[in-house]
């Protein structure tokens, strides 16, 4: 087995989006090739009341995972509803959709959730829009003997398969909790790009197969890095390998572990629309101006 080294560790950044929603952006709107097929991850726990009024999407899939509060949504196809605590909404924008998302706190005013954007390959960018609505009770959960726990949103993990199906990026998306002081290895296929986002507790993501080994003669000890500290709202991008290892801190650690097969396609991106070429991008915005953005079935 080959341990994935930590390629990068950064804190999510305060960002203003929608009609004035204060959130934290882990990555997005830059060079996202290291995260391919993923484009953006937002953590929205803060000032959310203004919401995300009507706006378009094309060429991507959005994954909304709510931990507290609700997100009310509606779209140009006539769909409407709400995503409650523990629920997931996977939206394939495909050739185009206009929708709104309005977060609301629970009875204590709490609101917390994540939105991940996954790119669509060129061959699927103009497919029909669709939704997958997943209730909390439908999300499989696994607890290991050491108390480590996983909610499996999508993909195969620890012998269970998540309920979200048919996603072009073939993602594995897991909500992982490791108890205080425990060390845990987690499988990630070698060919995938992978990252973790810590949102509770803290821990260390190990950087080498023997991170604490005492260097001896003949060992290139400068390349044997110690584990890397990661606390709340830290994003960890992993390098190649087939597993990651985490050492939970005194309060335990909870994080999203996400991986996907890279598309390795050109990205032309402006705002909520992601295409492969600038010509396609300009065409999309031209259609928005002309009122022809939404396509008939």
Image (cartoon, grey):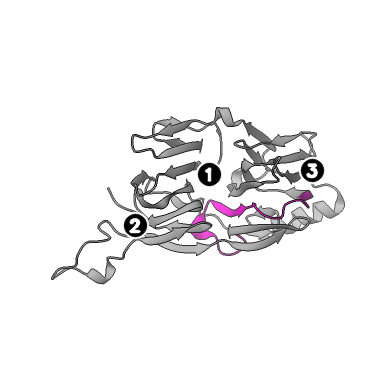
User: Toward which corner of the image does residue 15 lie, by quadrant?
Assistant: bottom right
Task: Give whichever of discs 3 and 1 has the lower sequence position.
Answer: 1
Q: Residue furthest top?
A: 137
Label 3 packing within 10 angstroms: few (<14), some (14-19), many (20+): some
C-alpha separation, residue under disc 3 versus residue under disc 1: 24 Å
Task: Give whichever of discs 1 and 2 has the lower sequence position.
Answer: 1
* SS class, disc 2: loop
Q: Please say if the residues under marks 1 and 2 sit with CB atoms less than 8 Å apart.
A: no
Q: Please say if the residues under marks 2 and 3 sit with CB atoms less than 8 Å apart.
A: no
Does the segment drawn in magenta span residue 47? yes
The residue carrying mark 1 is 169
Residue 143 lies, in percent from the top left, at 41, 34
Label 2 packing within 10 angstroms: few (<14), some (14-19), many (20+): many
Mark number displayed over residue 206: 2
Write the start and end of the magenta stretch as one range: 28-54
Can the viewer see residue 72 in this picture? yes
Does the segment drawn in magenta span residue 119? no
Mark 1 or 2: the one toward you: 2
Q: Is residue 136 above or below residue 246?
A: above
Residue 121 lies, in percent from the top left, at 58, 47
C-alpha separation, residue under disc 2 versus residue under disc 3: 47 Å
Mark 3 or 1: the one toward you: 1
Residue at image point 74% right, 40% down: 72
Q: Nearer the viewer, residue 99 or 59?
A: 99
Q: Nearer the viewer, residue 270 or 206?
A: 206
C-alpha separation, residue under disc 1 versus residue under disc 2: 27 Å
Mark number displayed over residue 138: none
Residue 162 lies, in percent from the top left, at 50, 33
Residue at image point 64% right, 59% down: 268
Can the viewer see residue 154 in this picture? no
């Amino acid at each position: 087995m080959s341990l994935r080294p930590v390629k990068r560790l950064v804190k999510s950044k305060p960002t203003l989006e929608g009609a004035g929603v204060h959130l934290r952006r882990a990555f997005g709107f830059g060079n996202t090739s290291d995260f391919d097929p993923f484009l953006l991850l937002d953590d929205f726990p803060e000032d959310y009341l203004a919401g995300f009024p009507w706006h378009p999407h094309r060429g991507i899939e959005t994954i909304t995972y709510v931990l507290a509060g609700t997100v009310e949504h509606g779209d140009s196809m006539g769909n409407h509803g709400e995503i409650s605590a523990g629920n997931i909404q996977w939206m394939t924008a495909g050739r185009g959709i206009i929708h709104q998302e309005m977060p609301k706190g629970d009875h204590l005013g709490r609101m917390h959730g994540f939105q991940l954007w996954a790119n669509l390959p060129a061959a699927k960018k103009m497919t029909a829009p669709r939704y997958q609505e997943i209730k909390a009770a439908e999300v499989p959960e696994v607890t290991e003997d050491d108390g480590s726990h996983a909610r499996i949103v999508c993909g195969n993990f620890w012998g269970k398969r998540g309920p979200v199906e048919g996603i072009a990026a073939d993602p594995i998306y897991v909500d992982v909790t490791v108890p205080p002081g425990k060390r845990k290895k987690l499988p990630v296929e070698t060919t995938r790009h992978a990252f973790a986002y810590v949102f509770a507790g803290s821990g260390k993501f190990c950087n080498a197969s023997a991170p604490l080994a005492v260097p001896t003669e003949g060992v290139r000890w400068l390349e044997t890095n110690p584990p890397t500290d990661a606390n709340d709202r830290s994003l960890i991008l992993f390098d190649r390998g087939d597993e990651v290892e985490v050492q939970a801190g005194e309060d335990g650690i909870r994080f999203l572990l996400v991986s996907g097969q890279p598309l390795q396609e050109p990205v032309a991106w402006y705002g909520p629309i992601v295409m492969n070429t600038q010509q396609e991008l300009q065409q999309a915005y031209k259609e928005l101006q002309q009122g022809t953005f939404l396509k008939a079935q």
